[in-house]
Structure formats: C-alpha cells, structure tokens
Amino acid sequence: MAKVCEICGKRPVTGNNVSHAHNVTKRRFNPNLQRVRALVDGTPKKITVCTSCLKAGKVTKHVRVKKPNAATGT
C-alpha cells in the first residue's frame, strides 16, 4: 500500500533524528492515513485519506443503513 492520501497527495517526507549529543540519523515522517468508506462519484468506495482531510470535511463518508428484518420486525 502506498502511503499517499488520495485527496491531497500527502506522502512521507524524510528528516533527521537528532540526539542530545547531536548524533544525526535519517528518519521518515509518515502521514496519519485512515482507510474509510467514502462516496466517490456517488458510489461508496474504500479510499486512503489523511486525517487532516477528514477533519477539514474534504471527504463525504458513506453511512450504511441497516434494513429492517421482515421476520423479526426490527
């Protein structure tokens, strides 16, 4: 799975771990991605989205509606 947001294109960036003794090693900053059921062109689809897009309301989440059961009446 590619660590890329399907809405804004946010992807991992690189940087450095810097210790107190100033030892520097490479590290990777990954975006906080969630797999959600969203409406894409009117159909529900699972997409990978960063939490900042979810919080900003750029994604319309799909809500499943439970149909009543005719046998039990619930």
Image: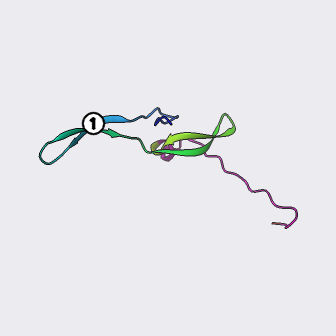
User: What residue lies at 69% left-to-right and 37% top-to-bottom?
Assistant: 42
Q: Position of residue 26 (x, y in %)?
A: 26, 37
Q: Position of residue 68 (x, y in %)?
A: 81, 60
Question: Looking at the rendering, which quadrant does residue 47 occupy?
Answer: top right
Q: Is residue 9 above or below residue 52?
A: above
Magenta segment: does it hold 59? Answer: yes
User: What residue lies at 47% left-to-right and 45% top-to-bottom?
Assistant: 51
User: What residue lies at 47% left-to-right and 35% top-to-bottom?
Assistant: 4
50 on left or right of 61:
left
Nearest the camera: 5 or 61? 5
The residue tagged 1 is: 15
The boundaries of the magenta stretch are: 53-73
Magenta segment: does it hold 16? Answer: no
Question: Looking at the rendering, which quadrant does residue 39 occupy?
Answer: top right
Q: Position of residue 5 (x, y in %)?
A: 49, 36
Q: Position of residue 61 (x, y in %)?
A: 61, 46
Q: Main secondary structure of the magenta part?
A: loop
37 on left or right of 11:
right
SS under mark 1: strand
Q: Residue lying farthest left?
A: 21
Residue type (three-letter) at the residue carrying disc 1? Gly
Give the quadrant of the C terminus: bottom right
Q: Residue lying farthest right?
A: 71
Nearest the camera: 4 or 67? 4
10 Å crowding of disc 1: few (<14), some (14-19), many (20+): few
User: What residue lies at 53% left-to-right and 44% top-to-bottom?
Assistant: 57
Colour setup of the view: rainbow
Q: How many discs mark residues in the rendered view?
A: 1
Nearest the camera: 1 or 32? 1
Nearest the camera: 60 or 4? 4
Q: Is residue 20 above or below residue 3?
A: below
